[in-house]
Image: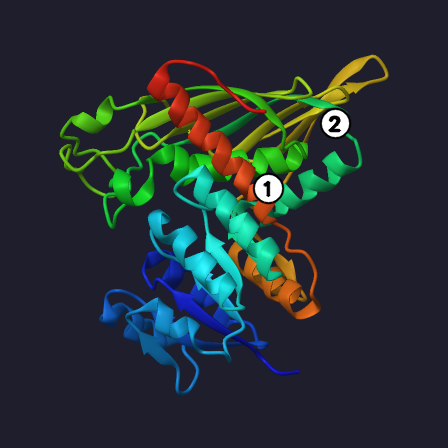
């Protein structure tokens, strides 16, 4: 079998920390091309991960002209996700775009349309679906063991975990702060477990409270309040068309101790589930309430053919296998688009003070 030839656009921390290490472990992949607006970053990535003769580009459009490239991984700031992904799809490439799908819901919808029009595959990097506890919980939900899930919470809370590097604090580049950065993971995971992608109304709020203080106590070091142009926390209530209610909570900086990130709480007619140190299932049997704990490494290590496989490795492997075998990726663009639409609705509700209704 010929190897899948992959090009990477955007060679910063998410590419070097997630995509490139996972791609380089796959025997069926050849990393052939690297593009970044900072030439040194692209060259360093090519030297470390690239195949012999790998090419380096400053302009990603030149990379897309290479007809031998099968797959593109888009690892740019959020504001370029749609532009680069659509161009890659139109160039005949399959595309994995890092989360969130796009800076705006309109751009996310354009990406969905481009994938349908070109017949190319498109997936979004929601790696928390590939944690062992997530995959186990998905099977439970599909088997109806929780019944009808009518209330849920999506948790993405940090006490002081503001990313002070790169463009994370730049609203123009990113579109928002913790809501679009880590809240998007929690929301995607919870919607996927519920298998419910039909929102009816969204009410949300976003806050710029702690961001405007000169704060030294932060995992990544102090931030500059003048450059902190996104929210430091945001919250939303989503009511689905079938009446199910989902509460979304996200923060980079919040005065609380019960911090959990990319975690869910599910409440169904037959049982419930949440995650702390373990996956906890609760319910009622034979007239008595019960709880059971299932042990997982929540950070995402399990085993594949005798080797440790992280959630990132599993995500990338299954994506490449979907390309090879012409199957649907686990994360579809239509699902990711709904996530973007809900996030935008929370920001819009905060801006107007009104609920946002869907069709």
Q: Earlier in the sequence, mark 2 or mark 1?
A: 2
Residue 296 visible: no
Residue 87 visible: yes
* Residue farthest along the bottom direction in this orientation: 53
Vertical placement of residue 260 versus 92, above or below: above
On-image quarter of the N terminus: bottom right
On the image, the x and y values in percent for residue 224 come to 14, 37
Residue under pointer 1 = 335
Front residue of 133/47: it is 47
Give SS at disc 2.
loop
On the rendered structure, is 335 left or right of 56? right
Q: CA distance from mark 2 to mark 1?
A: 22 Å
Q: Residue 143: which numbered mark, if any? A: none
Front residue of 162/238: it is 238
Q: Are marks 2 and 1 in contact (CB under 8 Å)?
A: no
On the image, the x and y values in percent for residue 270 come to 77, 22
Q: Residue at x 63, y 29 (%)?
A: 198
Q: Residue at x 64, y 55 (%)?
A: 329
| Residue 159 in which image quadrant | top left
On the image, the x and y values in percent for residue 106 come to 45, 40
Residue under pointer 2 = 146
Vertical placement of residue 243 versus 335, above or below: above
């Amino acid at each position: 079998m010929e190897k899948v030839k992959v090009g990477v656009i955007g060679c910063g921390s998410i590419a070097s920390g997630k995509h490139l290490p996972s791609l380089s472990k796959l025997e069926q992949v050849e990393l052939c091309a690297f593009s970044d607006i900072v030439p040194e970053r692209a060259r360093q990535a090519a030297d470390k991960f690239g195949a012999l003769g790998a090419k380096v580009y400053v302009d990603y459009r030149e990379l897309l002209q290479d007809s031998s490239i099968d797959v593109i991984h888009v690892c740019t700031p959020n504001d370029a996700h749609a532009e680069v992904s659509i161009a890659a799809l139109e160039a005949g490439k399959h595309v994995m775009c890092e989360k969130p799908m796009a800076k705006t819901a309109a751009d996310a919808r354009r990406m969905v349309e481009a994938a349908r029009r070109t017949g190319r595959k498109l997936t979004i990097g929601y790696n928390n679906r590939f944690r062992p506890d997530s995959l186990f919980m998905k099977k439970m939900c599909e088997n109806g063991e929780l019944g009808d899930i009518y209330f849920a919470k999506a948790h993405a809370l940090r006490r002081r975990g503001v990313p002070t590097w790169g463009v994370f604090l730049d609203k123009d580049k990113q579109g928002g702060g913790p809501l679009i950065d880590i809240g998007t993971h929690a929301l995607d995971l919870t919607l996927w477990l519920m298998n419910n992608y039909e929102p009816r109304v969204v009410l949300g709020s976003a806050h710029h409270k702690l961001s405007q203080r000169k704060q030294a106590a932060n995992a990544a070091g102090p931030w500059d309040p003048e450059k902190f142009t996104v929210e430091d926390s945001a919250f939303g209530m989503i009511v689905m068309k079938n009446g199910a209610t989902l509460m979304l909570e996200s923060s980079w900086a919040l005065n609380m101790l019960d911090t959990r990130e990319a975690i869910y709480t599910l409440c169904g007619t037959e049982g419930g589930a949440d995650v702390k140190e373990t996956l906890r299932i609760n319910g009622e049997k034979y007239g008595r309430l019960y709880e059971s704990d299932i042990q997982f490494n929540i950070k995402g290590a399990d085993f594949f053919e005798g080797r440790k496989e992280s959630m990132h490795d599993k995500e990338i492997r299954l994506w490449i296998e979907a390309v090879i075998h012409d199957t649907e990726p686990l994360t579809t663009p239509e699902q990711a688009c709904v996530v973007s639409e809900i996030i935008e609705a929370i920001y819009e509700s905060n801006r107007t003070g009104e609920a946002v209704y869907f069709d």
